[in-house]
Amino acid sequence: MKNIITQFSRIFVGILFIISGLIKLNDPIGFAFKLEEYFSQPVLNLPFLEPLALAIAVIMVILEVVLGIMLLIGFKQKLTIWSLLLMIVFFTFLTFYSAYFNKVTDCGCFGDALKLTPWESFTKDIVLLFFILILVINIKLIKPLFKNNVNAILTGITLVLCIFMAYWVLNHLPLKDFRAYKVGTNIEEGMAFPPDAEPAVIEMIFVYKVNGVDTEFTDKELMSIPPGAQFVDRKDKIISLGYVPPIHDFTMEKEDVDFTSTFLAEPKLMLFISYNLEIADEAGLQKLEALHQAAVKKGYKVIGMTASSQQEIAKVKAKYNFTFEYYFTDATTLKTIERANPSIVTLEKGTITQKVHYNDIDKLKL
């Protein structure tokens, strides 16, 4: 029975680490954004790690896959199992911190393929920790499937394939797009609320100073506020988020005017996505004006979308002689639409028809 439980744990942990690693390896930039969120000042307050987020993300996801394979084939048992234990302890700490303090609403454990709440993520990690501890206790029961040199070759092949996959998706696009803005999506439909959608439940909290102490009252307790109490503040407490459409916070604004509906009605629209122009790739930016001119000749309306300041926009337009206009969109939304900075997206009446990395402009069909 002990051996059966151990082998089940070995297969379960190995497969789950491989799946989780491959999903994040498909989109390491997305996982890097999540790590940046963890490293930020409001969460773990480790800002010095933010510039290293992408490198850390790539190393971690490759390790997940390689360690998962090593566990399944029984290669370097002690190194593999203790490494898995260290990783899961680290992940468990992050997910508990997120859940308990409500700091990060999605751990990114399975990228955009499977969204988990913070407590669901923490529960998943506790289950994994349980099975890895079984492996630690029964490490002598983990036997190699093949001879040592064969296991080493299989591990090496896995490592090389993972590195190649990381290189490919970083210089092109994810092999599989799990995001809300994948090709074929109509943005207006993605922002719509179904007639039977569950509304958000929000409770109004009123703060009054009673005998020198700030005291909270719900809207149902207003009649119980004592005479002479001074109003301090009013805040909203979210009881239930209700239905959240897959696409939200999507706007196309300029000088406080919202052009979203106008642009999404365009029969041919091309977007140049740059969530931050200050760190946008120079080689990519240099290609945009020529593409703009070619697209206009084919009947496209071409605009840029960024969360950068007007000063940064003016600086970039002057440097690269851009003749198209930039419109404001939330940075998180732009990062969700496409990972490359810059990247190109085409739409037909609000439906996404093409998405390309700046390295693949020649693949655009105008």
Image (cartoon, helix red, strand yellow):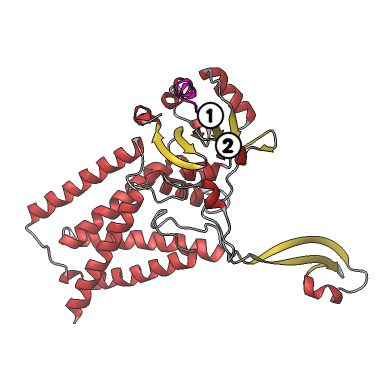
| Image position, residue 332 (x, y; %) | 53, 45
- Residue 11 lies, with reference to residue 27, above or below; the image says below
For marks 1 and 2 on the same chain, the one whose residue lies earlier in the sequence = 2
Quarter of the image where the C terminus is located:
top left
| Image position, residue 169 (x, y; %) | 33, 40
Q: Is residue 313 visible?
A: yes
| Image position, residue 1 (x, y; %) | 18, 82
Which residue matches tag 1? 301
* Relative to 314, 231 lies left or right: right
Which residue matches tag 2? 263
- Residue 201 lies, with reference to residue 331, above or below; the image says below
Task: Determine if the magenta segment contains residue 298.
Answer: yes
CB contact under 8 Å: marks 1 and 2:
yes
Type of residue at label 1? Lys
Report the Cα–Cα distance between label 1 and label 2.
8 Å
- Hey, which residue is sitting farthest bottom in the picture? 1
**Residue 262 figure quarter:** top right
The secondary structure type at the circle numbered 2 is helix
**Residue 364 figure quarter:** top left
- Which residue is painted at 57% across and 45% down in the image? 250
Q: Which residues are magenta?
A: 292-302
Q: Is residue 338 visible?
A: no
In front: 265, or 290? 265
Task: Determine if the magenta segment contains residue 31.
Answer: no
Q: Which mark is residue 274?
A: none
